[in-house]
Amino acid sequence: MTVDEARKALGEVYDPELGYSVTELGMIYRVEVSGDEVSVDYGLTAIGCPLADAIEEDIRRVLRAADPVASVRTRLVLDPPWSPERMSEALRLEFGYSV
């Protein structure tokens, strides 16, 4: 698996409250692939998000489903905090933010 393939797979993970993918929302901070292991740093749109565990499990699920991924490591990043500037340009426009 390449980093691009991992990022594409992560596009299948949706924030349950907002209904948009974690990649569109800019919640994925870093993806690293080493052999059959994928490491992902991710943020949340709100600290203390009650759905954080569900988002993390979905990240693990979609990457584990990819071949030849044997191991997935996730790390929640709180600094820098997530902000709307991390969203895709199209999504910022949809939410009414300037681009």
Image: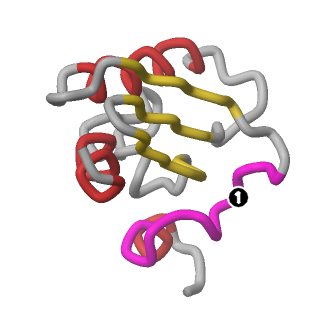
Q: Position of residue 89 (x, y in %)?
A: 44, 77
Pointer 1 residue: 83
Looking at the picture, which amino acid does disc 1 mark?
Answer: Ser
> Is 23 placed above or below 35 here?
below
Give me the residue at 59% from left, 52% from top: 29
Seen from this angle, which residue lies furthest left? 67
Residue 33 figure quarter: top left
The N terminus: image quadrant: top left
- The image shows a total of numbered marks equal to 1
> Is 99 placed above or below 30 here?
below
Magenta stretch: residue 90 in it? yes
Magenta span of residues: 80-91
Q: Position of residue 27 (x, y in %)?
A: 55, 47
Magenta stretch: residue 61 in it? no
Give me the residue at 15% from left, 29% from top: 67
Q: Name the colouring of the figure.
A: secondary structure
Q: Position of residue 36 (x, y in %)?
A: 32, 30
Give me the residue at 27% from left, 20% from top: 64
Nearer to me, 80 or 89: 80
Question: Left or right: 78 with respect to 39?
Answer: right
> Is 98 placed above or below 88 here?
below
